[in-house]
Image (cartoon, rainbow, N blue to C red):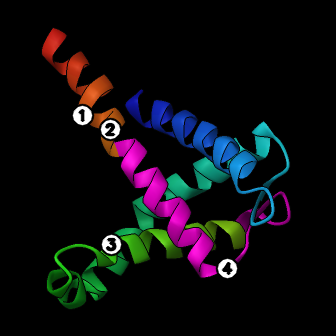
Amino acid sequence: MRWLIGIGINAILFIALAGYFESSFYIESFGAALAASFILAIINLLVRPILIILTLPITILTVGAFLLVINAVTLLLTDKLVGTSFEIEGFWMAFLIALIMSIVNVILQKTVFQNKKENN
């Protein structure tokens, strides 16, 4: 259930960020945002662990900051797989979106999901 909630949250984040970065980030519809979020979740499940293992030395040297580069690469891969209904203009826009999404997801993890664990 939490995985599906995460997909929904990322889809809403995609819509919000596409509205803010109109010229550099385009999403055709909410359905496209949901599809992109689902594909990103699958990529994070299957491809991201391999990328993390392959780049472990540089990730350790940068104290984990290189993970943002991996997140940007997974966003660009999502862009290529979804097609024209989900477009990101270049690596640095993907990096910025990855940074914002990471910050928002950490905040949500610490507030919303953490409170649910404490209440149970």
> Tag 1's secondary structure?
helix
Q: How far apart are marks 1 and 4 (CA)?
A: 31 Å
Q: Which residue is drawn at 24% across and 34% down?
A: 110
* Foreground of the two, 23 or 91: 23
For marks 1 and 4 on the same chain, the one whose residue lies earlier in the sequence: 4
Image: 112 above or below 110: above
For marks 1 and 3 on the same chain, the one whose residue lies earlier in the sequence: 3
Quadrant placement of the C terminus:
top left
Q: Distance between the residues labelled 1 and 3?
A: 19 Å
Return the residue found at the far top: 119
* Whether label 1 touches label 4, CB < 8 Å: no
Question: Depth-wise, is mark 4 or mark 3 nearer the camera?
Answer: 4
> Tag 2's secondary structure?
helix
Q: Residue at x 81, y 66 (%)?
A: 83
The three-letter code of the residue at mark 3 reads Leu
Q: What stretch is highlighted in magenta?
A: 81-105
Estimate how packed mark 1 is, as few (under 14), some (14 to 19) or many (20 or more) residues with alpha carbons within 10 Å: few
Q: Magenta segment, principal secondary structure?
A: helix
Q: Name the residue under label 3.
A: 67
Q: Position of residue 109 (x, y in %)?
A: 29, 36
